[in-house]
Image (cartoon, grey):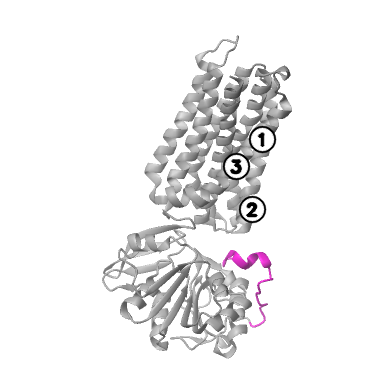
Amino acid sequence: MQKKVLMICLVIALLEGFAGLGIEIYAIRISATYIGSSISITGVILAMVLIAIAVGYWYGGRLSQAARTPRQALLQAGYVLSLSAISHAIACIIQLPLLAAMTSSTDSPIIAAIGVGLLFGVGLAFGSTAIPLITQFLSLKYKNDDGVDAGKNAGTMVAITTVGSVLGSTVTPIFLLPYIGLMSSLALFIASLAFSAWLCTKLAIQIESDEPIKPSDHVTNYLLFTSALVMTAAFIMMNRVDTGYQTATGAWFIKDTLAGRDLAVTITDKPGQSTSSCWVYATQKNCHWYGEIAVEAIGQTKPETLVFLGGAGMGTPSEVAHYNPKMKLTVIDIDKDLPKIIEKHFLKAPIAANIEFIGDDARGYLTRNKQARYDFMLIDAFQGQHVASNLYTLEALTQFKANSNDIMANIIGIPRKEHGYTQTILKNWQEVFGDTAYVLTKYGSVNLQNIMLCNFACPGSQKLAQAEFFNAQQPVHTDDLPRLDKYYYRSIKSL
């Protein structure tokens, strides 16, 4: 009997750790849709997670001191696990509106990350509170003369919940999100917490004890974790579209629209901030200004082989491929699952046969394939309004210069001398391409906009050195300045 009870307690600890960290991965994943993905954002959310776990262990220790009987300790553990389940369910419901509100009121992703960490930290704290309570149950139920002591109980419980946390933080991104999806993963985590609460409560009722059991002692637990399951199911059914089409790397949002009188569709990874591609079904053309300029430049240079760093909706490469079936196009995008979404929800047709899609980090792929040569390259990698700065360091642009003859880049920035990050990219372009560095803007020198860079006289452009908004004194950007910025999608709003 003792072994059976111990095994049930270990299962509860394992599920608590698994669900807690799994939900945090879910939170980070959804948050990336609004505040981006970077080392700093992930680090802040994880820091809040660890603080919540520490608070839960501390408070659980305080509660366990008041538990005088094994049944009291178990019922209290079931109660806090029920609170954990319902807290996470509520957090999932309000997360998207909260993120939308935070991103509209502040440009700092760190503040938003703290908000996310606090939001889900409540449920994590409740979950970790159960571990000291279950340890107290084992210590009260099985005294030292049975070979079980408090130190051994505590060590075992913490070890098992840590193993569960490891499973949650690894299985979730590698298997659950890619193969069963975001919503199904969320349901699994909430169900795991609810099941843990049920196990605790059921065990408390069934253990032998001289202490009488009253319905009020356990009905509250059942109501709470059942409510968590109902709320989660309702959230999944009502909000599936709000979280976009999920892949292991990103979330993509599809919206039908009009381009003039023609039916069109847009795709974005940042709803409300930007559109990554726009596609007109009738004409088989993209309907973005920067895409039209890129297509015109391709017609001007007449390349035979092209490479696109960044796929998004693949509007530009699809248009080029449709009207130039003999051209060979390569699209490199870090989101390996993107083609399935493009074909089913965006283009609503197979990707052109002369397009080769490579699911990889663009710079990493070209670094490993230095011998690759293309007639034309378009750098078009963003996350919402955040520029992939690792593609614009001196080292990266020098490497791309060796990979391709004619190069264009689509960046989002502010063509103003005072806007430091935009100027850094412009300075790097000038540093690498010199007299052949050209620039093209659309809305003058004050608005946030697409800016086209070329290493040739692309349509409508002027020499970068002659642009009145170019600050030639801006410092250059290298891989080592700063090092952590290599893979950071930095907000172009920052001066």
Q: Which residue is mark 1?
A: 158
Whether the residues at callouts 3 and 2 have beta carbons within 8 Å, the answer is no
| Separation (CA) of disc 3 from disc 1 | 10 Å
Q: Secondary structure at mark 1?
A: helix
Q: Secondary structure at mark 3?
A: helix
> Which residues are the magenta region?
472-495
The mark that comes first in sequence, 3 or 2, is 2
Q: Which residue is mark 2?
A: 43
Q: Is residue 436 above or below residue 176?
A: below
Q: Residues within 10 Å of mark 1 (few under 14, many from 20)?
A: many
Q: Is residue 15 above or below residue 352?
A: above
Q: Quadrant of residue 157?
A: top right
Question: What's the amino acid at mark 2?
Answer: Gly
Q: Nearer the viewer, mark 3 or mark 2?
A: 3
The mark that comes first in sequence, 3 or 1, is 1
Q: Which mark is residue 165?
A: 3
Residue shown at the point (41%, 50%) measured from the top left: 242
- In which quadrant of the rendered image does the N terminus lie? top right
Image x and y of residue 54, in percent: 68, 38
The mark that comes first in sequence, 2 or 1, is 2
Whether the residues at callouts 3 and 1 have beta carbons within 8 Å, the answer is no
Q: Which mark is residue 94?
A: none
Question: What's the amino acid at mark 1?
Answer: Val
Confirm whether residue 45 shows in the render. Answer: yes
Residue shown at the point (64%, 53%) measured from the top left: 43
Question: 62 or 261: which is nearer to us?
Answer: 62
Question: 277 or 462: which is nearer to us?
Answer: 277
| Separation (CA) of disc 3 from disc 2 | 16 Å
Q: Quadrant of residue 129?
A: top right
Q: Main secondary structure of the magenta part?
A: loop
Q: Residues within 10 Å of mark 2 (few under 14, many from 20)?
A: few
